[in-house]
Amino acid sequence: MSTFWKPSRRHFLQGTAAVAGTAALGPYGSAFGAAYPERNINVIIPTREGGGADRNFRAFTGIWKNYLKTKFEPGFFPGASGRVGYEVYMGKRDADCYNLIFGNMGPEVLNWVVQKPTFDLNDYLYFGRVDTDPGCVFVGKRSKFTHIDQIVDEGKKRKLNVGTSRMAHPASIGILALGEHTGANFNLIPLSGGKNTVAGAVTGEVDFSVLTSGTVAAKRKSVRTLLVFNDKNVLGEALDNAPTMNDHFGTKLPPLLSARAFAIHRAAIDKYPERFKVLQDTFKQVFNDPAFKPAVLKARGYWEYINYGGVEECAAYVKDILEIGGRFKSLLSGKKA
C-alpha cells in the first residue's frame, strides 16, 4: 500500500523561506548557494594616491559597489613607472576575482615595450575601461610660450627640457613625434606623477610639460594648454581651445590616449568564470547609472572622456599602443628598436 507524504504548515513555511533565500541571491548566487562577492574586493593602483587614476577609481567604484553589494579597498603601489604595482599584483595577489588592478593602460603597456616585465603579459587581462584621456602639451601661466609654434621655433634653436610623468607615456610619444616631424629638439625629463609634472611647468623647472589632458584641464587656472594629441579637442575652452597636432602640423598621428581600466588574472577567469561574468555585467551597468556622471564631475573629472570598454575594446587598445610603442621605442629608451 502506498503512502503519500502530506507537508504540514510548518514544512511549507520552511520550504517557502528557503526558496525566498535562494531568490534573494539574485543572478549572482552560485550553485552552492554562496553569493559573489562575499567579501570586499582589493584593488591595486600602481600610482600615487590623489592622482587621475585614484580620482577615476573612486568615482567609478563609488557606483559599482552598489551593484556588487560590496566595498573596494584600494592599495597604492607607485614606483618604477607602474611596474611595482603590477609586480605585486601578479606575484603576491591571489587569482580569485577578489583581487583586481586598476591601471592606466597607455603608459603601463608602453612600459612593457621599453622593458619586458618578469611575468607573462598574457597572464593578466584588461576587462573594463573607464575612460580615454588624450595627451597634451602645456606650460605654466607665466611662461613666455603662448603658442605651440613658439615652442617648435625655440626647439630648433636649443634643446628644450620637457616634463613628463614617465618616459613611457602616450604624451611622451606625442612630443617626440612632434620633434621628429618639425626638427625641434626635446629632452624628456620624467618627474614621477601628474602632480609633479604640472608643478614642473608651473615653476619653470622645465620649459614645458606633457601629460594626460584631463589632469591638465583640472589645473587650468595655473597652466595653459598649447596642443592636444587627439583627433579633436573635445574639452574646448577647458584646454584653451588648443589645436590638435594633426590639424595644426598636417601629421597623421593616431590619437595618443591614456585609458584607465580594470584588469584581472587570467587564472581567475579560468577558475571562476561565473565570478568574472558578475564583474563584467555589473561593471557595464555603472555607465548607465544616473549617479555616475555627478560622481565624475564631483571628482573633477570630465564626462566627455568617460568611455566604456569591455574585453574586446581593451584588447584593441593594447594592440594599438604596442604598435605605436614599437615605432617609437628607440626614442623612448635611447636604444635601437
Image (cartoon, grey):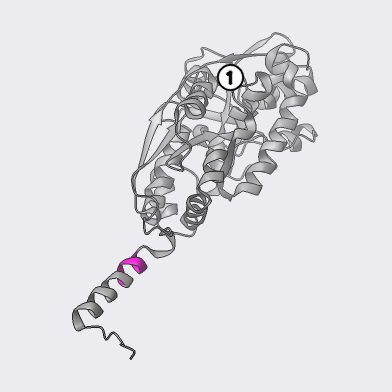
* Position in image of residue 212 (x %, y %): 56, 32
The picture places residue 31, in percent across and down from the top left corner, at 43, 60
Q: Residue furthest left?
A: 10
**Of 216 and 77, which appears nearest the observer?**
77
Residue 206: horizontal and vertical position, in percent?
55, 13
Range of magenta residues: 20-24
What secondary structure is the magenta-colored segment mainly? Answer: helix
In this rendering, the count of numbered labels is 1
Image quarter (top left, top right, bottom left or bottom right) of the C terminus:
top right
On screen, residue 117 versus residue 82, left or right, reads: right
Residue 300 position by quadrant = top left
Q: Is residue 4 above or below residue 99?
A: below
Q: Is residue 230 magenta?
A: no
Name the residue tied to disc 1.
208
- Measured as percent of width and height from the top left, residue 65 is found at 37, 50
Left-right relation of 68 to 141: left
Q: What residue sits 35% from the left and 54% below the top?
A: 69
> Is residue 109 visible in the rendered structure shown here?
yes
In the displayed structure, would residue 281 be above or below residue 296?
below
Query: The N terminus lies in which quarter of the figure?
Result: bottom left
Viewer-nearest residue: 279 or 131: 279
Question: Which picture quadrant has residue 254?
Answer: top right
Residue 260 visible from this viewpoint: no
Q: Residue drawn at (27%, 86%), measured in percent from left and top?
A: 6
Q: Work out which residue is located at the far front of the displayed protein and give it.
A: 1
Q: Secondary structure at mark 1?
A: strand
Q: Label 1 amino acid?
A: Phe
